[in-house]
Image (cartoon, rainbow, N blue to C red):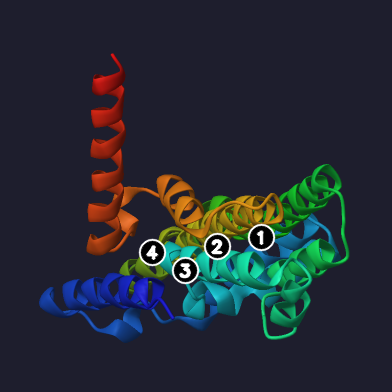
Amino acid sequence: MDPATIIGLLLAFGSLFAMITMEGAHVTSILLPPPMILVFGATIAVGIAGSTLTDTVSAFTALPRAFRGKVEKPKQVIDQMVHLAETARKNGLLALEQEAANVKDPYLRDALQNIADGTDGEELRTLLEDEVITTSKVNRGAGKFFKALGGYAPTVGIIGTVVSLTHVLENLDNPSTLGPSIATAFVATLWGLLSANFIWLPIGDRLNRLAELETERMNLILEGVLAIQSGSQPRLLGERLSAMVPKRKLSKAEQKAEQKSTKMEDLFDSEAA
């Protein structure tokens, strides 16, 4: 579990409440049910109106992933691919069928099963690439929905403020209530901006980022599986997959191994020249 979203939201709302407290105000001054109901209810409603029911259900189903989404380290994927390559090299490709039974990831499990079944390399690549594209579209669809809510929320908040100000103007004959009424009217705008920038947009960005990481993971598996099918050596496979990952995401040992490999290649090139 990566707690980045939870930490970020707690710090954001904590900063807001700290500001309110330091100014001598009360948190209850912004916790007003009418504007909150309008902003949250109408924002979600227009989000549904601008999408489909299927997309809406998928987006809210993906919502827990924004808070407890697991970010798998590339090193784990690379180590797993190297292990599978060693198994295939020692016991043959048919041994991958037994390995597939112990794999929880359906994408990798199906890929290994296809190798054991003798699926052609080009057909397997097409199949795996299509699945990567489809998964990416589904995952990005959830992020797109919440970012759309982030675009609607400020405008809905302004609508709430206009409605409240209209009510204020109807009661100008009572000056003693004008100040509190105007302050209450702007709470809708506050919640529109607040919900957009503290809730909807961060969740949308988080889901999009998780989608990117999942795509990167699946591409590592794709290249690893195809290399295993073609009989690639485990060590070379590990170096190839490591080259697909930014160095900052690799362990120190892997970084040193990659740098050593690069130096050896440069040495051979200079001797050849």
- What amino acid type should be assigned to the residue bearing mark 1? Asn
- What amino acid type should be assigned to the residue bearing mark 4? Ile
Q: CA distance from mark 4 to mark 2?
A: 37 Å
Find disc 2 in the rendering and name its residue: 207
Ranked by sequence position, the earlier of labels 4 and 2 is 4
Q: CA distance from mark 1 to mark 4?
A: 42 Å
**Where residue 182 is drawn, which disc sits there?**
4
Residue in the image at 69% along x and 79% along y: 99
**Where residue 206 is drawn, which disc sits there?**
none
Ranked by sequence position, the earlier of labels 3 and 2 is 3
Find disc 1 in the rendering and name its residue: 139
Q: Nearer the viewer, residue 10 or 151?
A: 10
Q: CA distance from mark 3 to mark 4?
A: 62 Å
- The answer to the question of whether label 3 and label 2 lie on touching residues, with beta carbons closer than 8 A, is no
Question: In the picture, which quadrant includes the C terminus?
Answer: top left
**Closer to the observer: label 3 or label 4?**
3
- The answer to the question of whether label 4 and label 2 lie on touching residues, with beta carbons closer than 8 A, is no
Disc 1 packing (10 Å; few <14; some 14–19; many ≥20): many
**Closer to the observer: label 1 or label 3?**
3
Q: Nearer the viewer, residue 91 or 146?
A: 91
Q: Secondary structure at mark 4?
A: helix
Q: Is residue 117 left or right of residue 254?
A: right
Ranked by sequence position, the earlier of labels 1 and 4 is 1
As drawn, which residue projects farthest toward the top? 273
- The answer to the question of whether label 3 and label 4 lie on touching residues, with beta carbons closer than 8 A, is no
Q: Nearer the viewer, residue 197 or 69?
A: 69
